[in-house]
Amino acid sequence: MKKYLLFFLALLTVLPVSGYAEEKRERQNKASLVVEYGLDSLERRYYHPSFRFDFPFKGGSWFSEVQYISRMNGRLQGAIDYWVNAGMQKAVGDKLRLELRLNHFCRHETLRDTLYVWSINEVLARVGLAGKKFNLALAAGPFIGSSPGYRELLVLNGEWRGVLFPELSLFAELKLVNFARLYHEGGFFLALNRNVDIFFKNTRHYEFPNTTYLGLRYRSGDRNGALLDTVKVLAGVSPFDHRFKLEVEGGFKLEFFRNESRRVALGIEFETPILNGDSFFSQFWPARMNYDIGLDYEKKLAPRLFAAWVACYRLAMPVDKDRSFTASLFTGLGLRNQPNFDELGQDVRYEVAAGYNFKRGLELDGRFGLEIWKSHALRLVAEMKTQVDGRRMRVDLRLLACPANRVELRPYVGWKKDIQMQSSQDVPGRFLFGLGFFKAF
């Protein structure tokens, strides 16, 4: 049962939802991003992005969440908690909220051998009370297909906004496991502006010591002036690959100093290939965490031509294996015909960059998109992404269907391959099909 439950949960988070009312503004699809970055009491770096997508239908809404919590020391060793949550909720009147959700949690270690991975599945029925300045909720349910020792769960959480003064908010959560073990999380947020907070919290969570965190929290929003540019998450299946069975990727961009002629953009993207295991329905086990941290300074040359100085730091960290990480830094000059490649603003989209990789030498990166067919409700788009240096060439080909919504659901089929230039060993290509979520703010 445990094997099939994890695969079912992955499908539930990416399956398109039908039946929502597109014609009503308040029932349009929504997306949000919350990113926390700071330090903990064990002198480690703390990074916690949380992606959420809501798909309303008549009488309620479906939601899915993808988040991970990374705690790294100076050698990039540490724990990564993965959360994949999905469920449905319904409003009863102005204040009462009913919710049914499934939360999948697992913990992995980077750059260390891991003999055992905690895998926990919470099934919760939740009743919430929402006020103007407070939220209060009570949830209860069983653990299903979880690690040994987890049976019943009771959760109480709340938030109080505007305590003492408008910028201060308090929050707390209590988890009672098997009516015997008590876990907690509590702290405060201090708003610096409408998108950025200082946070402080103390947490004792599953199989983890009591830890304190301090840092900055960024919250996205649909209002004008928000720094967030785009957010995306994609999940693909590789049914014919003997190495990997799934791939999860995503990212977001933040804009600074933007005006009609220039902008500075910070982008963070991640990619996690999931190992095949003994069978396709075996336990989910990430092979590594890949990060691309990019910084662009972009200047507008013409209505459809932009030049940019680009820099990208690429980091690959093995998960649950005692192996060293690999990293490289690329910088160069680029040209593009629209600021954000993932937005379907034009029939033909391109983005090219050439420069120097301090580990691999000269490098050429390119992206090309072509609209094949379009109607009032759907687009078919072909995309190609390449990265070439003296040692290898990476190719990513995809065909996507893109419905016209505020939050775009993009089912796709694709093929990826790494070609080694200086090695006779050929790595076979990988076929993928899956679904992506994309939102431009």
Image: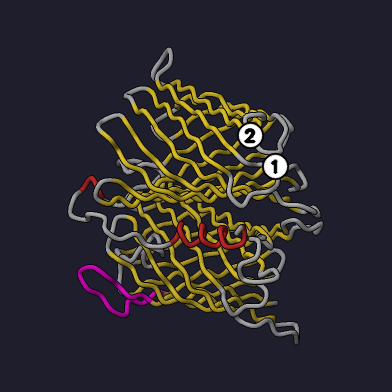
Q: Is residue 42 magenta?
A: no
In this view, the residue in front, 145 or 253, is 145
Q: Residue at x 34, y 35 (%)?
A: 97
Q: CA distance from mark 2 to mark 1?
A: 8 Å
* 352 left or right, relative to 339: right
Q: Residues within 10 Å of mark 1 (few under 14, many from 20)?
A: few
The answer to whether the residues at label 2 and label 1 have Cβ atoms under 8 Å apart is yes
Where does the magenta region start and end?
A: 369-381
In this view, the residue in front, 359 or 114, is 114
* 272 left or right, relative to 435: right
In this view, the residue in front, 254 or 83, is 83
Dividing the picture into quarters, in which one does residue 95 lie?
top left
Image coordinates for residue 215, horizontal then vertical, percent: 58, 32
- Spot the residue most to the bottom: 424
- Looking at the image, residue 331 lies above or below residue 392: above
Question: What sort of colour scheme is used for the picture?
Answer: secondary structure
Dividing the picture into quarters, in which one does residue 381 lie?
bottom left
Among the two numbered marks 2 and 1 on one chain, the one whose residue lies closer to the N terminus: 1
* 28 left or right, relative to 141: left
Image coordinates for residue 130, horizontal then vertical, percent: 35, 28
Q: Residues within 10 Å of mark 2 (few under 14, many from 20)?
A: some
- Looking at the image, residue 81 lies above or below residue 341: above
Q: Is residue 370 magenta?
A: yes
Q: Which residue is denoted by mark 1 in the rendering?
A: 149
Q: Which mark is residue 71?
A: none
- Spot the residue most to the left: 23
Image coordinates for residue 57, horizontal then vertical, percent: 27, 52
Position of the N terminus, as image quadrant, is bottom right
Q: Which mark is residue 178?
A: 2
